[in-house]
Image (cartoon, helix red, strand yellow):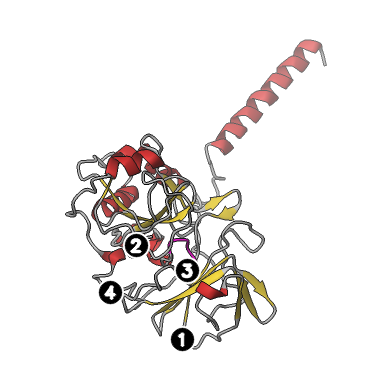
Amino acid sequence: MSSGQLVTVLGLFFLAATALSGARVAGAEPPTGPPRAAAPAEPPPYNQDLTGVQVFPSDNPWNTDVSGLPVHPRSDVFINSIGREKNLHPDFGSFYQGRPNGIPYVVVRGDQPKVPITYSYAGESDPGPYPIPDDAPIEGGPDARGDRHVLVIDRDNQRLYELFKATKVPGGWKAGSGAIFDLGANRLRRKGWTSADAAGLPIFPGLVRHDEVVEKGELLHAVRFTCVRTQRGFISPARHFASSSSDPSLPPMGLRLRLKADTDISAFPKNVQVILRGLKKYGMLLADNGGDWFITGAPDPRWNDEELSTIKRLAGKDLEVVQTGEIEH
């Protein structure tokens, strides 16, 4: 074969390979069958069925409409201290660095066996036993660092069990602290007591969940959020502070904010609009020290992380603090 013939053959081979590669990139299927539909994202491998579960009475602070409450006279001061130009951040989604992104929960029946709990801070914790399955999901995964929250809802007895810094041990669990909440009542923690969260609040009712946002299209409660620096004080329903600072410009635990009513949300994705409407009506409660303007939700592989990231278009200046009570120390 001459050199000219070899060049021609190689050129034809290259063109054929390029065409085949382009067809594959475009998602073309062999002509012998119809295109295969993409498999839907699977739900979490733990029970999230909340059918019949009432998450506190309708007049509970978490479920209260705050859209008509007056703006706090120190609203600008508190917002500036957190970050007027800092963006809101969805601290939940499908996966982050290969791990479920958010605070998970598991729903159990009333006959779930209860196991003992040992605490590092037993003095402000509700003693066990708790109905926690051996394979209950831990925030960040079994080998994660960080807060390692474990949340369990007993659907039959309407009880919420929450642990902080939880680790599975033979015969039970050990944790930093823990709390039990009656989901049918409005009882608060004892004043000055923490819970599984710094503010002494329950965590579960403040989670943004896939079932309510995507499946039901309504967010009917306040959302949990964090900020880096707080003051030595709290506003009810919070019961505990996590700071030694007496700086009055810093936000207290339990501070409640809402998205300003005139904020245009029409350009956001449909599911994000559900969240933002909830933030206008029910607002968000400061519950722990963490990232500034980090709002909390439950992980779910069905979340669209690209959609959720549009929440970052909003910043502290789009929020306002509402007056819900006096600061306690």
Nearest to N terminus: mark 3 or mark 1 = 1
In this rendering, the answer to whether 50 lies above or below 282 is below
Residue found at x 46% / y 47%: 229
- Residue linked to disc 1: 110
Residue 138 lies left or right of residue 309; in this view the side is right
Alpha carbon distance from label 1 to label 2 = 24 Å
Label 2 to label 4, Cα distance in Å?
A: 17 Å
Q: Which portion, as a residue range, is magenta? A: 195-199
- Kindly report which numbered mark, 3 or 1, lies closer to the viewer in this rendering: 3
Q: Nearer the viewer, mark 1 or mark 4?
A: 4
Check residue 233 in the rendering and tell me which mark sits there, or answer none: none
Residue receiving disc 3:
195
Q: Which mark is residue 57?
A: 4
Residue type at mark 1: give it: Gly
The quadrant in which the N terminus is found is: top right
First in sequence: mark 1 or mark 2? 1
Residue corresponding to mark 2: 212
In this orientation, which residue lies closer to the viewer: 226 or 233? 233
Q: Give how far apart the Cα atoms at labels 1 and 4 are.
A: 20 Å
Question: In terms of depth relative to the viewer, which is nearer, 20 or 133?
Answer: 133
Measured along the vertical axis of the image, is residue 176 above or below residue 242? below
